[in-house]
Image (spheres, rainbow, N blue to C red):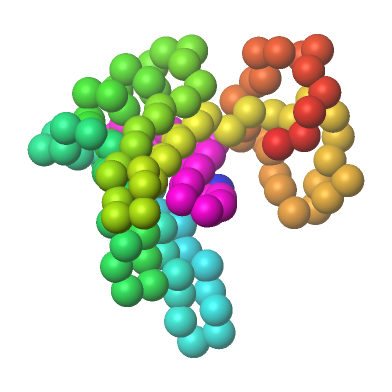
Amino acid sequence: MKLRIRGNALRLRLQRQEVQGLVETGKVVEATCFGDENFVYTLESDDHTTAIRAELEARSIRIRVPENQVMIWAKSDEISLYGEQPTSTGPLKILIEKDLACIKPRTSAQWEDESDAFPNPNPSCGGNS
């Protein structure tokens, strides 16, 4: 699972096995080690949540998505789930996407393994992600 943070926006991208894991176990967890400490981000399917929500805790971000939305999204051709969460500085935008294979070869292919990416439905586009 990839995480991008820019301003007041979070973007998660999941490969096929991660989407499958979210459906089967209700959770996908990723961690980045910073020496002696880890930063953890978690995506959870939650039957008690009514909207996509993010929580910031010590060295971690937890994003919860209503379980019914996850199930419909995972089994469909839909690429993304989107939600906004009110904050004191404006909405926090949360985008969760199926990770699509790149159309153009990446110059930094050693950084990312796309072997489990979803097929890109638009082979004629040329933008990088």
- Left or right of residue 39, residue 83 in this image: left
Residue numbers of the magenta segment: 3-24
Which residue is found at the position 53% from the left and 39% from the top?
13
Residue 125 in the magenta stretch? The answer is no
Which residue is found at the position 86% from the left and 34% from the top?
105
Q: Which quadrant of the view contains residue 67?
A: top left
- Vertical order, 115 against 55 (above or below): above
In the image, residue 51 lies at what x, y percent?
A: 23, 34
Q: How many marks overall?
A: 0
Q: Which quadrant of the view contains residue 41?
A: bottom left
What quarter of the picture does the C terminus occupy? top right
Looking at the picture, tell me which residue is in the foreground, 25 or 31.
31
Which residue is found at the position 32% from the left and 62% from the top?
56
Looking at this view, name the residue that lies furthest to the bottom.
36
Looking at this view, name the residue that lies furthest to the front.
89
Can the viewer see residue 27?
A: no
Can the viewer see residue 111?
A: yes
Which residue is found at the position 70% from the left and 44% from the top?
113
In the image, residue 57 lies at what x, y percent?
A: 29, 68
Residue 11 in the magenta stretch? The answer is yes
Looking at the picture, tell me which residue is in the foreground, 95 or 110.
95
In the image, residue 109 lies at what x, y percent?
A: 81, 47
- Vertical order, 118 against 47 (above or below): above
- Vertical order, 56 against 18 (above or below): below
- Left or right of residue 126, residue 51 in this image: left
Looking at this view, name the residue that lies furthest to the left.
48
